[in-house]
Amino acid sequence: MATSPTEEMPFQFDELFFSRTDTAGIIRSGNSVFQRVSGFDWDELIGKPHKVVRHPDMPRAVFYTLWDFIKRGEPVGAYVKNRTKDGRHYWVFAVVTPIDGGYLSVRLKPSSELFGVIQQEYEALRAKELAQDLSAAESARLIYARLKELGYGSYQAFMADAISCELLARDVQLARMSDRRIPVFKDVLGYSQGLLGQAATVAASYGKNERVSLNFQVQAAKLGDAGVVTGQISKNYDLICSQINASLAKFATAAEDVLGTVQSGLFLTCTALIQREVLDLFRREAALADSHGDEIPKLESQMLAYQDRAIEGLSSITDQALVFRRKCDDMKRMAGALEVTRIMGMVECARQKSVGENLTELLTELEALQDTVSGGLQQIDRLNQRIAYGTESLLSQSRWLLSRAA
């Protein structure tokens, strides 16, 4: 019976795909799920390019991104629509990791709300590719820009969210408990995003401080001899502001590093989880069919490597959070010096009635800005504490799970 191109090839949520290719993308091995769902016989898969299952609806940007990551030796995740031998289609979320001599891909059935969003985005992007004859690189720039519009600072941020959303949604479909680390990771991710937001608030406040400080100097100059002390206070304020501005870029970068490290840790942890599950499935399949048994050591080695990388990623979160806390301490020290200088200005204003209302108003405005900075730094302290607590919990759980598996 003929099949329609719009017809979907069914498979179950508990079924996981596995395939291994060489560095050129030539299929060297796979499991029965891959063979059955694709509809090809093994002799039509082994030794053939993996693009034998590529669907024409797929944006070129996705494969451009996949190859960009794995050629740099980095793991990557992506939603992929594939085509079966008889023209039907099936969707997967694929996690591709570099191994010695090639690449290993593990794929699951997606079902999250994010999956629905991405289906629409792919359709729109593919239409643009065809209408505008875009190169893969040009299309990739479009997809990165669109991800930013959707709230993702980078493709790494997107794939960390995507894999965690799909694992949680899959556990719902399978009516089973999710790994306890994923919700904790989501919380830590939220705290890290909060850090970035508060760091931006502090930076914006200091930007306004700089403008008010300049007005402070102008008003002091207008006072002439009566404004000598006020002028010196203004210069001190300006000097401290300059030191703060010089530190703001490092401060913001440190916040971004915390967020990036958390996203990486989440992706690595989820990758290790799905690799462990496909390894268990592959072992059972190999035992029953007595085939592809030589793939088990490769899978096991890869899974163990990513478990170790996940632990290292958690340790990196702690390290990056410590760096950020030190930057915060520097900012608090300079903010304290700034506040002392502002108070000295208020005292001088009170001492000299001739300073005028304008200067008093400027100092009052500086007080409001300093309050905003102080509040932002306090909130950052609280977020740092939550990140530290969450990361320690993740490390403890991960080490415990590793000890059980050993």
Image (cartoon, rainbow, N blue to C red):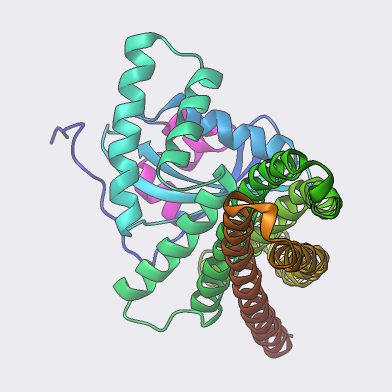
Please tell me whether residue 218 is drawn above or below residue 240 in the rendered image: above
Can see residue 290? no
Relative horizontal placement of residue 67, taking residue 112 as reference (left or right): right
Q: Is residue 46 one of those drawn in magenta?
A: yes
Q: Give percent across and percent down for residue 403.
A: 73, 88
Give the residue at x 54% y 56%. 160
Q: Give percent across and percent down for residue 64.
A: 56, 28
Please tell me whether residue 46 is drawn above or below residue 127 in the rendered image: below
Q: Nearer the viewer, residue 102 or 31?
A: 102
Q: Is residue 160 one of those drawn in magenta?
A: no
Q: Give percent across and percent down for residue 336.
A: 78, 69
Please tell me whether residue 187 is drawn above or below residue 401 in the rendered image: above
Give the residue at x 65% y 58%. 264
Relative horizontal placement of residue 333, taking residue 51 as reference (left or right): right
| Magenta residues (range) | 33-54
Q: Residue furthest left?
A: 1
Q: Nearer the viewer, residue 329 or 257?
A: 329
The quadrant in which the C terminus is found is bottom right
Give the residue at x 42% y 63%. 165
